[in-house]
Amino acid sequence: MSGIDAVAAELKKKKKGVEFTKDVHTARPGTRICFLRGPQGVSIELLDRDPKYT
């Protein structure tokens, strides 16, 4: 499990007041991404890149 998957699982498990507007997925090889809305309506993008693709 990559870093973003662990972070997303923790946020979902703890009910931290965030809503996932797009679940974690592979945008392209080596790039995992998700979108969420924070407690005050702020849109947040989480991005996890595999160093071998940079």
Image (cartoon, rainbow, N blue to C red):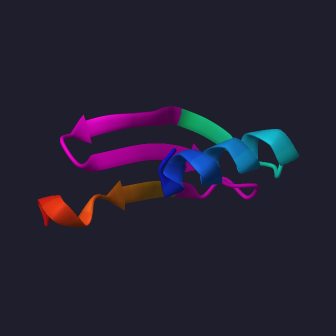
Q: Is residue 13 above or below residue 50?
A: above
- Give the tally of numbered discs: 0
Residue 33 within the magenta-colored segment of the rendering? yes
Q: Is residue 15 visible?
A: no
User: Where on the picture, by quarter, is residue 40?
Assistant: bottom right
Q: Is residue 25 above or below residue 18?
A: above
Q: Residue furthest right?
A: 14
**Image coords of residue 29 (percent x, y):** 18, 41
Magenta stretch in the rendered image: 22-43
Residue at 67%, 55% in the rendered image: 38
**Image coords of residue 14 (percent x, y):** 86, 47
Q: Is residue 23 visible?
A: yes
Residue at 68%, 42% in the rendered image: 9
**Image coords of residue 46 (percent x, y):** 46, 56
Give left or right: position of 11 versus 32: right
Q: In the rendered image, which quarter contains the C terminus?
A: bottom left
**Image coords of residue 5 (percent x, y):** 54, 45
Q: Magenta span: helix, strand or loop, mainly? A: strand
Give left or right: position of 35 versus 52: right
Give left or right: position of 24 versus 13: left
Residue 16 within the magenta-colored segment of the rendering? no
Residue at 23%, 49% in the rendered image: 30
Residue at 27%, 49% in the rendered image: 31
Residues 38 and 51: in front is 51
